[in-house]
Amino acid sequence: MTVVTDMLATYPKDLGGVDREKLAACIQACIECAQSCSACADACLSEDMVAELTKCIRTNADCADICDTTARVLSRHTGYDANVTRAIVQACATICKACGDECGGHAEMHDHCRVCAEACRRCETACNELLATLG
Amino acid sequence: MTVVTDMLATYPKDLGGVDREKLAACIQACIECAQSCSACADACLSEDMVAELTKCIRTNADCADICDTTARVLSRHTGYDANVTRAIVQACATICKACGDECGGHAEMHDHCRVCAEACRRCETACNELLATLG
Amino acid sequence: MTVVTDMLATYPKDLGGVDREKLAACIQACIECAQSCSACADACLSEDMVAELTKCIRTNADCADICDTTARVLSRHTGYDANVTRAIVQACATICKACGDECGGHAEMHDHCRVCAEACRRCETACNELLATLG
Amino acid sequence: MTVVTDMLATYPKDLGGVDREKLAACIQACIECAQSCSACADACLSEDMVAELTKCIRTNADCADICDTTARVLSRHTGYDANVTRAIVQACATICKACGDECGGHAEMHDHCRVCAEACRRCETACNELLATLG
């Protein structure tokens, strides 16, 4: 988590009352989950039983996009708008729950779904913990 | 709107009860708003008074990211999940409101903010109209 | 193309020797192709013969990502760096050629691939025409 | 690097002759650099001397977009196309060089630029090392 925390530590202005640890953890969880979901969508695509994994591929694609965007919004602090942060982190928690459930359902059969489900669960938790600290 | 509606028309499965016109309008509004916000952030950056436009630049960056992601999620129909759609379209309406207000405040002085504020307003409206049709 | 050209027209500083028409056409082609590819990947995913379309889905995913990024880079003019522009537009022409070929191969069987192949061809052409104008 | 390498290890098909270590290192460097650049653009925006950092902000924005896209392309293996991989990794090395130079020029004055320049250098190196292994 070095780069995320280093960048947070070098931000030149006041970060307000934000919980830095929860914020850094959420950014880190988002970028790991985004990468994991891009990779899992592609791994599902290469399974012989791809026809049974189409919902999983779609959910992974949404999760990668929303997690990447959430990591970006959370990496910005200038002109902070709590409503925007709350809305996108809420959307991120929603898709991570959906994707964790979907991948979790294939975890016993596909190791990539197992690894990805864990990344989704961590990200869902990190989003909810960050949301709890927002005013 | 040709390509967006053409792609919607050629989707091979049932689209459920979705309002195709509102859906296509929202996708189109999102991609136009995303481009407009990327361009407006950069135009603000090139203004001599950039120091007074930093919140605008940041809000534009968030709006570009969230609109791009929303357009992607709305362009997918396989394994539709109403909770995810609702959450991301809600986040999109929230940032478009914020960015429309921010750019709107500079519209008299900067033409790029005027054009961008209009794109944000159209996208906010399109998101809210789509939300109203979701179950 | 209204918003793209309006944003280009309202950029507050000199755009250098850029060919505005080719630039606007390329941005517009990129955002249309990106949306079309996201939709085509999902449409392929919903085909009964998805197992025969996995390379198409993957290529569509790459094309959506690269086109979106290219549209963003081309929407910025501050501190212009010709090497960066050339490299990303070249990458975009490469993926649009690959995706146009791939979707083109399924165009007779799947209308979404036909529409998408056309968007890819237009974007490939727009990229190459813009590249020809760059110093 | 756990999630990146875990996802690579669980891909269900043959990865061909790819150098897994270099590939994983490049994906990891791309996602760290993308996050760092989003954060650095925003940190620059909050500096009192923002007017002198506009080229840095723009270069950071391009670098974040290109690195995110490169990480996504490299996370996919289905229907591998060496031309596409080479073109996007080349574009990524180009922007990382440009952004490392730009941020490096402000590293003594701004700690966020120092941290970000290091992330850009690592990513440039990782891209070039991966390129050297591609056929």
Image (tube, coloured by chain):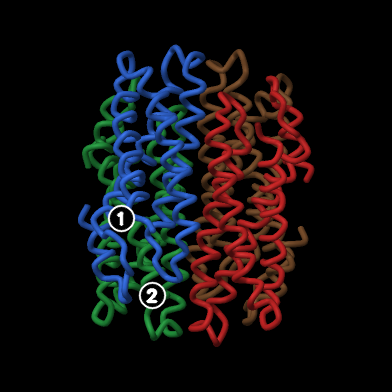
Chain colours: A red, B blue, C green, D brown
Relative placement, left or right, of D73 versus C86 is: right
**Residue at the disc numbered 2:** C44
Residue A11 is situated, as x and y percent measured from the top left of the image, at 70, 26
Residue D107 is situated, as x and y percent measured from the top left of the image, at 71, 26
The residue at the point 59 percent across, 56 percent down is: D71
The C terminus of chain D lies in quadrant: bottom right
- Badge 2 element: helix
Mark 2 packing: few (<14 Cα in 10 Å), some, or many (20+)? many
The residue at the point 53 percent across, 77 percent down is: A45
The N terminus of chain D lies in quadrant: bottom right
Residue C129 is situated, as x and y percent measured from the top left of the image, at 27, 49
**Residue at the disc numbered 1:** B23
- Chain letter of mark 2 equals C
Residue A125 is situated, as x and y percent measured from the top left of the image, at 71, 53
- Badge 1 element: helix
- Residue at mark 2 to residue at mark 1: CA–CA distance: 20 Å
Which residue is nearer to you in this view: A118 or C23?
Answer: A118
Query: Cβ–Cβ below 8 Å for labels 2 and 1?
Result: no
In the image, residue B50 sits, relative to residue A131, either above or below, namely above
Q: How many numbered dots are placed on residues in this image?
A: 2
The amino acid type, in three-letter code, at marker 2 is: Cys
Which residue is nearer to you in this view: A77 or C87?
Answer: A77
**Front tag of 2 and 1:** 1
